[in-house]
Image (cartoon, helix red, strand yellow):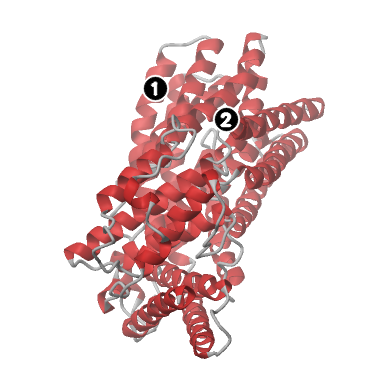
Amino acid sequence: MIRGGRPRPLSGVGRVLSPRGALAVHQVDGAFLFALRAALAMALVALPIVLAGRPDLAVYAMLGSFTTTFGRNLPYPRRARVLALVGVAMTACVGCGAALAALAQPRAGGAGAVAVVLATALVAGLAKFACDAARLGGLGAVLLLFSFAVAANSSTALADVLPRTGLAAAASAVAWGLALVGRLVHPDRPQRLAVAAALRALAELLDAVGAGKATGRKRHRATVAVLNAYHSLGLTPPADVRCTGQEGACARLTDMSWSLLIGSARPSPDDVPVTPERLRQQALLLADRRHRVIPLLPELASRPAAAARGRALPVTGQAAAEAGTDVQRASELMLGPRHRGPGHISARVVPALRMTLGTGVAGGLALLLGLGHGYWAAISAAAVLHSVNIRTTAQRAAQRTLGTVVGLLIALGVLAAHPDPTTLALVIVLLEFLLEYAVVRNYGLGVVFVTPLALLLSDMAVPVPVGELVHDRGLASFLGIAVGLICALLVVDDHAAVRVESALAACTRASEHAERALAGPCGPPPPDIQVRLAEAVVELREADDAAAGELWPAGIDPAELAAAEQRGYRLLERLLHHRWE
């Protein structure tokens, strides 16, 4: 990354528009059952309506069922609260969209169509801001916008508003119930998956350390994963719990991960080192639903967290210069309310402004060009702009372009067969399953299925000739992608640089606080000091990576950031040692 001064904008365009990493596929535990639950939530409400001869109304039930997409990694108590709020928001989007369609009649053109374009842009910005503030990952704001846009661009009478809103609410309720039914079978399933993710991230870090490679980004990912595991368990590091059973096993594994993260084990005759391969094997056992009781590998079951004390893992100056797409996935893992620096609220305004401007311009251009289903342009722009910075926007654009082309071919093949409404509904349910299964691995793979899903939903609501539907979708999508990229480049996010400065100051304060606590005569420092310091180090890395993806990166010497990160990890090691002394 270029720092130490203000680079010219043109010098950073090639850097931030690189699509590198856009085609990477990630491993995700529990994706199959999550996708199956999402498809079931859609089918249970929509198929009876289709069989009753009202496929046009089934669309609104399907929109409400998108509630199940959110909160996939949350423990069940928090999932219940989050999905309840999401269900209300999804229902409100459908209801407000239907009411606007009834009042404005956008399909007739004129001022009503302009009003819908403006309202769509406003909803996009608000949804982006709210989802970023709540750290809702995945498709997030795009699904809320999609629900509003579909309802707002339909032919609706005032008498239809309440039934359509009621169907969305009923589907949201069904999705909420299905998302929580797993608690009756595996109540600790989300916690197990969080700990498994931490073990895998730690194994990657130990592999990098053993190979002598730069470990800054992998250390960041491992730190985020371990903190997320603690947060999922409702504990703070290190937990040092004495409880037994499933909770105790997860807590012991997480404590061991924490100690291995901030210090490498010093082999001794009585201590068998934990290899990355064994960590991955333990992660597989945790993710396996067939085990009601967590099976612990012998060397992990007998290994106390204190045994992993040792020298700190090396932090190189080169690590601070690493950049990539991990920041977005890392941000989605951080579920706690403490991961917010002084400048974060203002930093969220610019992405929301980009989203508002991009969807408004894309929708307006589609209206001027006379494209049917012009709201697809707005949704495509929103999907591209639903990102962390310009770099991830460019990656989303590449993924969206490739996924749209393949998805259009799938939709063309399905619609060319002229399926009856029941078959069409079954295909939509299948596409929802494939979407939820693929999108967590790679956004581009998800777009392959979301494109025909959107087309078939539109065809079910208002049937039109196949060629016209595919033509409009293609042009509107590519228009929205182009507009999204241009808006990302024109609306420069200088707050990202401010965020780096705030994160560096917060990390320095947390380090100084830890040093004072270590120097004090009052026994072991309180655990919250470790938590705050670890979160400050994570935020420093995330802020630096986010700023690196903007045209104006932070003007801070990378050596200073590397030194602050290194100081933080060394203090975490000292805090861990002090706790066990």
Q: Residue at x 70, y 41 (%)?
A: 84
Tag 2's secondary structure?
loop
- Quarter of the view holding residue 29: top left
Type of amino acid under label 1: Leu
Q: Is residue 462 in view from this perspective?
A: no
The one of 557 and 482 positioned closer to us in this rendering: 557
Q: How many marks?
A: 2
The one of 245 and 415 positioned closer to us in this rendering: 245
Q: Position of residue 54 (x, y in %)?
A: 67, 14
Q: Position of residue 543 (x, y in %)?
A: 45, 71
Q: CA distance from mark 2 to mark 1?
A: 41 Å
Q: Against 199, is 107 above or below?
A: above
Q: Which residue position is annotated with label 1?
A: 412
- Quarter of the view holding residue 517: bottom right
Q: Which residue position is annotated with label 2?
A: 185
Query: Which dot marks residue 266?
Result: none
Q: Nearer the viewer, mark 2 or mark 1?
A: 2
The one of 158 and 345 positioned closer to us in this rendering: 345
Q: Against 431, is 282 above or below?
A: below
Left or right: 257, with 272 as reference point? right
Q: Residue at x 58, y 76 (%)?
A: 526
Tag 1's secondary structure?
helix
Q: Residue at x 44, y 67 (%)?
A: 542
Q: Is residue 536 in view from this perspective?
A: yes
* Disc 2 packing (10 Å; few <14; some 14–19; many ≥20): few
